[in-house]
Amino acid sequence: MEMASVWLLVLVFFSETCNVLAEGDPERETLISFKKSLENPRVLFSWNGKTPHCNWVGVTCELGRVVSLSLPALFFKAPLSPSLFSLPSSVPSELGELTQLETLELGLNFFTGKIPPELGKLKQLKTLDISGNALTGTLPSQLGELTQLQFLDLGNNLLSGSLPVTLLTNLQSLTSLDVSNNSLSGSIPSEIGNLKNLTDLYLGPLPEELSKLKSLSKLGSFI
């Protein structure tokens, strides 16, 4: 009986210690900041101080680090309230602090504003989906620093300008690229021929260099 009491005390101490550590975790603070930035934070009502952030809806951790943030169509899942129909927020630059992220999915959330260049800090990112929002401005060249990226979906936004050359020269691991249904202009850089692993591509005016993409099985256009 005494041994059982000792183990109970150890478990309580361990639990309390983990909670204290979690409260000071910079990734947890980044996620809280993300929630507060939303026009309608109620969409993440399950993100509360009583639950470790690695157990929050849409959050996946490995060895205590956040590796996936998957929150598609948040505003379709929100409790009905007047604020639900007000203009949503932009994608917060603080997400760039989640440096172990491998998956970031924020599609169909009506986010406005520009794509934060800080996303270029997510060097482990393999999947980036911010499609189906209302993002404006040009594509930040910093996205070309995501050299582990395999899936990139920026389609169905209000993005303008041309494709950064760095996007087409550095992302050698890309298998899927979608920038369709935006307001992109100019010709597609011939450097697109460097993306040898592409199987799915949704773009615009098509250069001859596309003939180099031997693995390509799907092709779409934004014009």
Image (cartoon, rainbow, N blue to C red):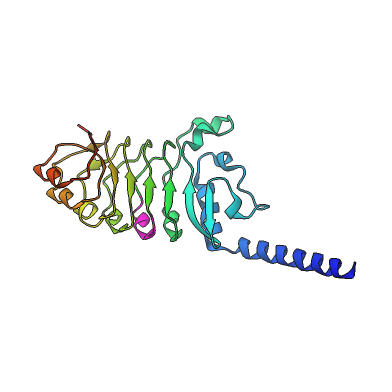
**Viewed as shown, does residue 57 lie left or right of 72?**
right
> Which residue is pictured at 9% across the width and 42% down the height?
208
**Viewed as shown, does residue 188 lie left or right of 27?**
left
Instruction: Report the label total.
Output: 0
Quadrant of the snapshot with the C terminus: top left
The residue sitting at the left extreme is 208
**Viewed as shown, does residue 218 lie left or right of 117?**
left
Between 29 and 53, the residue placed more toward the observer is 53
Residue 135: x percent and y percent?
Answer: 34, 40
Residue 67: x percent and y percent?
Answer: 48, 56
> Is-magenta flag for residue 117?
yes
> Which residue is pictured at 46% across the width and 58% down the height?
98
The magenta region covers 116-125
Is residue 108 visible in the rendered image? The answer is: yes
Residue 157: x percent and y percent?
Answer: 32, 37
> Which residue is pictured at 81% across the width and 64% down the height?
8
> Is-magenta flag for residue 112?
no
Position above or below: 33 against 221: below
Question: In the figure, residue 25 lies in which quadrant?
Answer: bottom right
**Viewed as shown, does residue 84 lie left or right of 8?**
left
Position above or below: 65 against 199: below
Between 92 and 147, the residue placed more toward the observer is 147
Quadrant of the snapshot with the N terminus: bottom right
Position above or below: 17 against 101: below
Is residue 92 visible in the rendered image? The answer is: no
Residue 206: x percent and y percent?
Answer: 14, 38
